[in-house]
Image: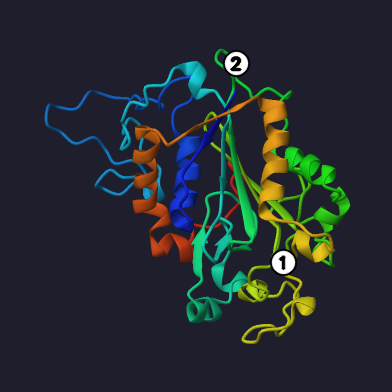
Amino acid sequence: MLSMIVDDVREPAWNLALDEALARVPGPRGGRRPAPRRRGRPGRPGSVPPQRPGVPSHGAAPYGVPPYGVSPYGVPSGRTAAERSVPVLRVWQNAPSVVIGRFQNVEEVVDLAACARDGVRVVRRASGGGAVYTDSGTLLFSLVRRPRPGERRISPDAPDLDVLVRTALGRLGYPPDVLASGGLGGKAGAGLSGKAGGGLGGNAGGIVQVAWLHARDAVLTHLAVHVTPINAYGPVYLMPPDGGTARGRNPPPSEVSGRHTLADLGAPITLDTVRAAVLSEIMDVYGIARTRRPDPEEQALRDHLYSVRYGDVTWNLSGPAGPRRAAREFTGG
C-alpha cells in the first residue's frame, strides 16, 4: 500500500515545508518525545524552569524544531498506526528556482545577481547535498519511509527511491552510468548513486540527483529528474564548479556543465512518460497508490515549518544557526 499526496503547488518553499512535515509527523511509534526530567527540587508554583541552551526565551527552538513537550501542530490526524507506517509519495514541480543544500554557502554556489534579475527563487532545503536548478522541465519525487508497526528499523526489503527511479529509467533505455555521470560531461558521482558517495553533490549535478533527510522515525528521500530543458540557460544561476567565468553571461547549452536533461541524450522524451514509468515501478514494489490530501496534522506542521524556516529569508540565505558542520541527520553529498 502506498499513500500518494496530491498537492499541486509550485511554490518551492511550500513544497519543501510539506516534504519535511510528512517526515516529521509522529509515526506508528507514537508522538514526540516527552519533556526531559530535570534534576533537583521541583520549582515553586508559578516559577519559570531554566532555559534550555540554544533555545530562545520565548520557548521556540531555532529554525522550526519544536522544543521537547511542545507540539505546535498538535492536531490529531485520525489515522491508525498501520496507516501512519504506509510509505508516502509525492510527485511535484517547482517554479523556476535554485534549491541549495542545508549546509551550503549561498554566495559560493548561486549567482544571486542573476537570480534577482530574472525572478528566480533561492530556497534552502533541510536535507544535505548541493545546489540544483529546477523549473517546469524537472520532475521532483519525494518518498517518506517508516518502520512497520512493532519494528524499529525500516525493512531492507523495500528499495529506496533512487533505486526505483534508476530501474524505471533503465526500462526506458537510459543506462545508469549515463545518469550518474551527468550524461554530457557532468560531474561524476553527483548524480544517481549510493548513499555513501552520491547525492546532490557539487554544482555540476547529473540528470538524476538525490538527497536524504533522516528524521526521528522516518527517512525522506528527495529526487530530481531533469527531463526537458525548458530554460536552456537555467544552469547559469549556479556558480561554475571550476570557478569559471560563466557569471553574468548566457553561454550556449553546450558550454554549460551545470545541468543536463534526458532530452539532451537524443531520444524524444516527455514528462508524462517519465512520471508514468517511475510511478509504475514504485507501485510494483509498494503496491497500489491511494491518493489523498495532507491531513490536518501535516498541514499544521507544514505551516509551522514555513513560518519559522522555509519562508524565512535568513534561513534561505544563511542556513542553520551556529557553525556549519555536517550532522548525522542530514546526508546527500
Please indicate, yes or no, whether residue 28 appears anywhere in the rendered image: no
The residue indicated by pointer 1 is 259
Q: Nearer the viewer, residue 254 or 301?
A: 254
The residue indicated by pointer 2 is 151
Secondary structure, mark 2, is loop
Query: Label 2 to label 1, Cα distance in Å?
Result: 40 Å
Q: Farthest residue toward the top?
A: 150
- In the figure, 325 relative to 265: above or below? above
> Could you say which disc has been placed on residue 143 in the image?
none
Q: Position of residue 129 (x, y in %)?
A: 64, 54
Q: Position of residue 31 (x, y in %)?
A: 40, 24
Task: Name the kind of residue labelled 2 in the image.
Answer: Glu
Binning the other alpha carbons within 10 Å of mark 2 as few (below 14), some (14 to 19) or many (20 upward) gives: few
Please indicate, yes or no, whether residue 241 appears anywhere in the rendered image: yes
- Relative to 231, is 76 on the left or the right? left
Q: Nearer the viewer, residue 32 or 135?
A: 135
Q: Position of residue 121 (x, y in %)?
A: 49, 67
- Relative to 243, is 127 on the left or the right? left
- Relative to 236, is 303 on the left or the right? left
Q: Quadrant of residue 301?
A: top left
Mark 2 vs mark 1, foreground winner is 1
Q: Residue at x 29, y 24 (%)?
A: 40
Binning the other alpha carbons within 10 Å of mark 1 as few (below 14), some (14 to 19) or many (20 upward) gives: many
